[in-house]
Amino acid sequence: MTDDALTPDQIQQIRDRVAELMPQVRADLEELVRIPSVSASSFDQSQVARSAEAVAELLRREGLDVEVVVEGGRPAVIGHLDGPAGAPTVTLYAHHDVQPPGDDADWDSSPFEPVERDGRLYGRGAADDKAGVMAHVAALRAHAGNLPVGVTVFVEGEEESGSPSLGTILEKHGDRLAADAIVIADSGNWDIGTPALTTTLRGGIRVVVRVQTLDHSVHSGMFGGAAPDATTALVRLLASLHDADGNVAVAGLDAGEAADIDYDEQRFRAESGLLDDVSLIGSGSILSRLWNKPSITTIGIDATSIDKASNTLSAKAAAKISVRLAPTQDPLVAFDRVREHLEANAPWGARLTVELEEHGSGFAADANGPVYDEARASFADAWGTDPVDMGVGGSIPFISDFSARFPDASIIVTGVEDPDTRAHGANESLHLGEFEKVCVAEAVFLARLGALRPAR
Ligand SMILES: [Zn+2]
């Protein structure tokens, strides 16, 4: 690989070309936003079919061979266009379905009628993820008639519903999606003016623990003081999951460190709504706690409610805990560690049952090698500043499906969101200035990958 796969002039030409294209890209984005393609089953699914067809038509106009694929779920769109002989291949992922809009009254303008205010385009899907779809289309348009790489576009229709048929799609059509690089445009950037590659996502498990101390509930006056009640035993058990500083106390879970990115306590307090006198928990940098270390949250408890309380020792109580896992952690191994911890810490010999309700893998990109080098260079070309490696504390479970199915591909997670996007919330919006940079970065990336070829 050479240091400069493209000349500054070539990069400037792509910037200029994308700038010319943006009015039409935006108009097409607005047309997509006007289709209320909510994939949740209580919504009109003919709209999801309409948005699939609209995406298919956009890709056909760019000369792609396009098929709308339905494998028991919502319609996905797969399009392909060959590049020059021997050129690398790239698969571009986005999704055309959206979250339900929620209550219209919470929106300042109608969710499915895009409106610009202060440089942002408001509407459900204006960012997540119809702008991801349009970033791919914009990159194709920027190279119309002279595509530097082979491109497959895969636009899913059920990401917001947990991608139930993605496994089948990957099984039946995976050969068409295989590529040297897979660009997943469904995340975001670090801040306005600071691009990011999302290189880690946490995994997670949900565990239900049930505690029993007595054969049946009994009078607290007659037996309290000598027999333990199940609710108190459960609370002591849950308390054992953290040390006094709030670090997860379960032995044997993976933990790592985040890249050194500026993120201070004040910003965290403002974003999380943490009360003034409440301290943060855990140790290490805040971003490591959010992205690279495990966390445990009690998300539900079954115990006698205050309304129904009587002077009784409860026989049974239960809790559901959500455990977020370091990106590299095997979730089933993590479940074993959590189960062992709970069994070892059952107070007073209380009987336990521990059940794994749900598990999902995290993702840790191998963020090295020529494809990542060109991706980073492309972001720097578009923004004038290097991208940061960003983590995400939550999960995008389908990304681990991709990395399992295509272990040799470089998976690059990008996106159009910024900290004010409010994806899934009311007043979702896209920063139009940043969106143009996303389009430039992707168009430059395709050119840079194509230019890598002779040096391979
Ligand atoms: Zn999304």
Image (cartoon, rainbow, N blue to C red):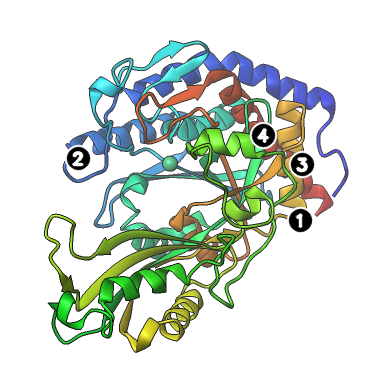
Q: CA distance from mark 2 to mark 3?
A: 42 Å
- Comparing 208 with 48, the one in front is 208
Q: Position of residue 96 (x, y in %)?
A: 37, 38
- Identify the residue under disc 2: 45
Q: Are marks 4 and 1 in contact (CB under 8 Å)?
A: no
Check disc 4 and give the amino acid type: Pro
**First along the sequence among labels 2 and 1:** 2
Within 10 Å of the Cα at label 4, are there few (<14), some (14-19), or many (20+) other Cα atoms?
Answer: many
Residue 451: give its label.
Answer: 3
- What is the CA distance from the residue labelled 2 to the residue labelled 1? 42 Å
Q: Which residue is at a point 23% across and 28% down the rendered structure image?
A: 103
Tell which circle, 2 or 3, labels the residue nearer the N-terminal end: 2
State left or right for residue 201 relative to residue 39.
right
Q: CA distance from mark 3 to mark 4?
A: 23 Å
Residue type beneath disc 1 = Gly
Q: Count all numbered tags in the image, as a single digit.
A: 4
Gap in Å between the C-alphas at discs 4 and 1?
19 Å
Foreground tag (4 vs 1): 4
Q: Position of residue 368 (x, y in %)?
A: 75, 56
Of labels 3 and 1, earlier in sequence is: 1
Q: Is residue 176 left or right of residue 55?
A: right
Q: Which mark is residue 369?
A: 1
Q: CA distance from mark 3 to mark 1?
A: 15 Å
